[in-house]
């Protein structure tokens, strides 16, 4: 390639790069527990949103590092409060859904997990989310309140990577959200003890402007969609 | 022996300067954000000390595995010929280009508890690799091996086979030749290969968190700790990054005789 050719190619690449960020499509920062629902939201709104999916605290870290987005969704109020306190979001956060903690079991339950106390067994491979993300905080809260001495083998960076490791059978059990278990069709431990451990999902407009996605999430149609995915009402 | 250098042509100088900027600006950015006054305090917290310990154990073990497995492989690649060798050479380079997260997932498919071979390991030998320190060593060895093998292989090729042939004439067996003739001459490149493999293993993140998970004191290495700390405690993450940077620079300093020599 000649120098001129190289220069033209570089220029073209640079144009393509800046073009990507400026084609008018909106960016939404959503927690990984909503992985299974974003496609449905696109269908319902007949729009193409760039969904950035990660653990809630990572999303806030991205905003702090200058990421541009229309909305931020977090899987708990603590993380949203953090974003608001740091002045990263302009709008008023709204609770639009809830989720609850479940013990998801590997397909076929090879570890023969039957009770919550089985999660203390050292011979099983047990996973939770890292304490930095909402599902990890909720799991720690539950373990504390229920006096569980969890035999933890891994603290995954987000609920989705944890759920996938349970689904693939690499872990015997994992403390994940009801929606992730439902989305991956995972068997869950039959117990009422975890019922009090719920989390709220909040959505906020990053720049304070009205957001189609945020409006949809609180609308009857949005609420119905969330319900089909196993999210509870706020 | 060399003529005085000629001026760098402008079409080369400008992109070269941009490249230098791209390489050096992030370092400057990192260093100016480092919490210098609390650096020692941050790096000696229990979580970070645990991560340093895990990182040292994992990266040193992985380097040893690279020597034990990689040295023979490098010899085979340098001294044997044929289509199979060409295929092997591509295979060796693969972990260099594969995204580490993909490497980790592939390791799970192969050696995980429900993996193709991992299932046998688990059922017959009672060995479970994922979520163990050994698993982290396997992941680190996977990504570091190419650095060791390619370094030693190219040295073997550069050295040529003359000495080997001379040894054969004196009646030495191929094994004796390897131990007494080839190996002593390889020492500098083995050292360089170990340093590169060790540095790569130390910085390994994607394959480790995917294959071995993340648990303090067992599988949470410095890069994994950094990734988690970035969300809650960015200053500590920067402090750990400065530590990793210092270690990397030391490795390069050790290699200076090899790479920076004019």
Image (cartoon, grey):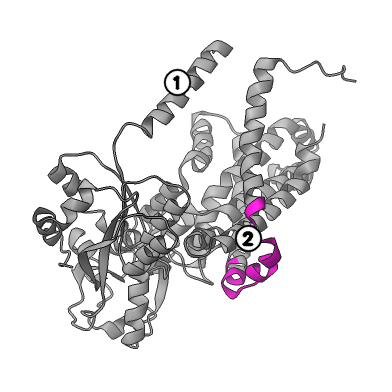
Q: CA distance from mark 2 to mark 1?
A: 38 Å
Check the residue under mark 2 and report the chain it is in. B
Q: Residues within 10 Å of mark 1 (few under 14, many from 20)?
A: few
Residue A153: quadrant of the picture: bottom left
Residue that mark 2 sits on: B239
From where the camera sits, is residue A37 visible? no
Query: Residue at coordinates 40% horizontally, 75% vertically from top-left?
Result: A152
Element carrying mark 2? helix
Q: Residues within 10 Å of mark 2 (few under 14, many from 20)?
A: many
Residue that mark 1 sits on: A12
What quarter of the picture does the C terminus of chain A occupy?
bottom left
* Residue sitting nearer the eye, B30 or B185: B30
From where the camera sits, is residue A72 visible? yes
- In the image, taking residue B7 as reference, residue A178 lies left or right, namely left
Element carrying mark 1? helix
Check the residue under mark 1 and report the chain it is in. A
């Amino acid at each position: 390639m000649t120098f001129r050719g190289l220069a033209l190619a570089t220029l073209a690449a640079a144009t393509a790069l800046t073009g990507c960020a400026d084609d008018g499509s909106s960016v939404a920062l959503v927690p990984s527990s909503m992985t299974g629902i974003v496609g449905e939201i696109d269908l319902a709104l007949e729009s193409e949103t760039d969904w950035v999916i990660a653990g809630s605290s990572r999303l806030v870290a991205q905003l702090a590092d200058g990421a541009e987005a229309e909305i931020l969704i977090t899987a708990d109020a603590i993380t949203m409060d953090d974003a608001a306190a740091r002045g990263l979001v302009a709008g008023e956060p709204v609770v639009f859904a809830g989720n609850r903690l479940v013990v998801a079991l590997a397909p076929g339950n090879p570890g023969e997990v039957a009770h919550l106390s089985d999660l203390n067994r050292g011979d099983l491979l047990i996973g939770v989310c890292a304490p930095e993300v909402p599902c990890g905080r909720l799991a720690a809260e539950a373990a504390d309140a229920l006096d569980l001495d969890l035999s933890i083998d891994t603290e995954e960076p987000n609920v989705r990577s944890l759920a996938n490791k349970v689904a693939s059978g690499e872990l015997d059990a994992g403390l994940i959200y009801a929606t992730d278990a439902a989305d991956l069709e995972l068997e869950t431990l039959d117990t009422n003890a975890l019922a009090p451990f719920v989390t709220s999902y909040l959505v906020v407009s990053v720049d304070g402007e009205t957001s189609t996605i945020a409006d949809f999430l609180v609308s009857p149609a949005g609420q119905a969609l969330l319900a089909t995915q196993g999210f509870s009402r706020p | 022996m060399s003529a005085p250098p000629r001026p760098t042509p402008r079409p080369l100088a400008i992109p070269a300067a941009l490249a230098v900027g791209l390489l050096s600006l992030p370092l400057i950015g990192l260093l100016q954000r480092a919490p210098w006054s609390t650096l020692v305090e941050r790096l000696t917290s229990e979580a970070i000390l645990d991560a340093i310990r895990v990182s040292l154990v994992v990266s040193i073990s992985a380097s040893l595995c690279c020597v034990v497995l990689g040295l023979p492989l490098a010899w085979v690649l340098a001294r044997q010929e044929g289509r199979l060798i060409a295929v092997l050479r591509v295979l060796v380079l693969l972990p260099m280009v594969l995204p580490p997260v993909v490497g980790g997932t592939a390791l799970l498919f192969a050696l995980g508890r429900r993996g193709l071979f991992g299932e046998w390991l688990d059922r017959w030998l009672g060995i479970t690799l994922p979520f163990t320190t050994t698993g982290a060593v396997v992941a680190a060895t996977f990504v570091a091996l190419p650095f060791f093998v390619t370094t030693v292989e190219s040295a073997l090729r550069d050295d040529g086979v003359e000495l080997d042939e001379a040894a054969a004439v004196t009646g030495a067996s191929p094994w004796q030749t390897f131990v007494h003739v080839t190996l002593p001459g390889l020492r500098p490149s083995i050292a360089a290969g170990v340093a590169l493999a060790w540095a790569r293993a130390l910085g390994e993140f994607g394959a480790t968190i995917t294959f071995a998970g993340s648990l303090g004191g067992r599988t949470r290495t410095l890069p994994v700790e950094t990734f988690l700390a970035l969300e809650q405690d960015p200053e500590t993450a920067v402090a750990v990054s400065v530590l990793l940077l210092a270690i990397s620079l030391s490795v390069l300093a050790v290699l200076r005789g090899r790479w920076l020599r004019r």
